Image (tube, rainbow, N blue to C red):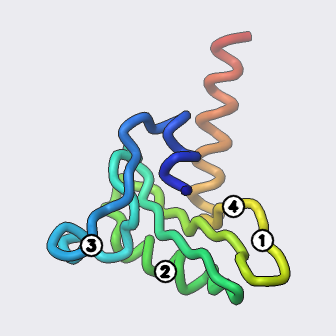
């Protein structure tokens, strides 16, 4: 479900296969996401810091780790949220502002 959502930005995005490929890079649940490493969780009780820690561990120095989470239980479901380190958020904001200024 998340891979399909992200295909608008990352056309080659897909889930990593279980088994050998996912063992190669634990903490990285999706492939085809460029410089972003996604660790996904859909659960009734979310653990964002633990999932972000898994993504951070899997990320290479030039990549941005993201915990992608969605609450899902019998009572309710939520939209997807992304959790990332503040330093990475600031890099994204700076890149956005630079791009915006170039286009202005």
For this view, does 5 lie left or right of residue 46?
Answer: left
Quarter of the picture holding the C terminus: top right
Residue 53 is marked as 2
Q: Earlier in the sequence, mark 3 or mark 2?
A: 3
Q: Is residue 102 above or below residue 84?
A: above
Q: Is residue 71 above or below residue 86?
A: below
| Residue at x-position 72% and y-position 75% | 71
Q: CA distance from mark 2 to mark 1?
A: 24 Å
Q: CA distance from mark 4 to mark 2?
A: 18 Å
Quarter of the picture holding the N terminus: bottom right
Q: Earlier in the sequence, mark 4 or mark 2?
A: 2
> Mark 4 near mark 2, Cβ–Cβ under 8 Å?
no
Along the viewing direction, whichever of 47 and 56 lies nearer the viewer: 47
| Residue at x-position 58% and y-position 46% | 5
Residue 50 at x, y percent in the picture: 54, 86
Residue 79 at x, y percent in the picture: 75, 60
Residue 18 is marked as 3
Q: Earlier in the sequence, mark 4 or mark 3?
A: 3
Q: Earlier in the sequence, mark 3 or mark 1?
A: 3
Which of label 2 and label 1 is nearer to you? 1
Which of label 4 and label 2 is nearer to you? 4
> Mark 3 near mark 1, Cβ–Cβ under 8 Å?
no
Residue 77 is marked as 1
Which of label 4 and label 3 is nearer to you? 3
Residue 80 is marked as 4
Which element carries disc 4, helix, strand or loop? loop
């Amino acid at each position: 479900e998340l891979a399909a959502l992200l295909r608008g930005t990352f056309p080659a995005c897909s889930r990593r296969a279980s088994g050998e490929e996912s063992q190669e890079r634990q903490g990285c649940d999706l492939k085809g996401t460029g410089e972003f490493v996604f660790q996904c969780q859909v659960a009734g009780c979310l653990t964002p810091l633990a999932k972000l820690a898994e993504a951070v561990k899997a990320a290479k120095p030039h990549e941005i780790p993201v915990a992608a989470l969605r609450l899902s239980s019998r009572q309710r479901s939520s939209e997807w949220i992304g959790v990332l380190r503040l330093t990475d958020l600031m890099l994204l904001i700076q890149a956005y502002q630079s791009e915006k200024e170039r286009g202005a």
